[in-house]
Amino acid sequence: MAMLVVMVALMIGFFWHGGDRGGHMTAISPASEAAKSPLYLLDEAYARGEIGREEYLQKREDLLRR
């Protein structure tokens, strides 16, 4: 679980600090704040340790069945 949290943190850091070739720093997020998908929000909750593995898997399955 700790490895997952570290991997997510590294990915967020990579996207946040990635700049364009002009030297400007841009914040690149996988989804805008206003339009994050339910799966993305579920992944974030799991990565933060707010829900356990079983709950994550069940909710993910439920969302994918829609």
Image: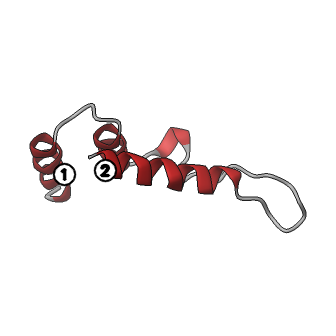
Between residue 10 and residue 44, name the one nearer to us.
Answer: 10
Q: Residue furthest front?
A: 2
Are there few (<14), some (14-19), or many (20+) residues within 10 Å of tag 2?
some
Q: Name the residue under label 2.
A: 39
| Residue 61: percent from left, percent from top | 13, 55
The C terminus lies in quadrant: bottom left
**Precedes in sequence: disc 1 or disc 2:** 2
Q: Position of 51 compared to 8: left or right?
A: left
Q: What residue type is labelled 1?
A: Arg
Q: How far apart are marks 1 and 2 (CA)?
A: 7 Å
In the rendered view, tell whether residue 32 sits above or below residue 24.
Answer: above
Assign a secondary structure to mark 1: helix
Q: Residue at x 19, y 58 (%)?
A: 64
| Residue 41: percent from left, percent from top | 36, 42
Q: Name the residue under label 1.
A: 60
Q: Residue furthest bottom?
A: 21
Q: Which amino acid does label 2 sit on?
A: Leu
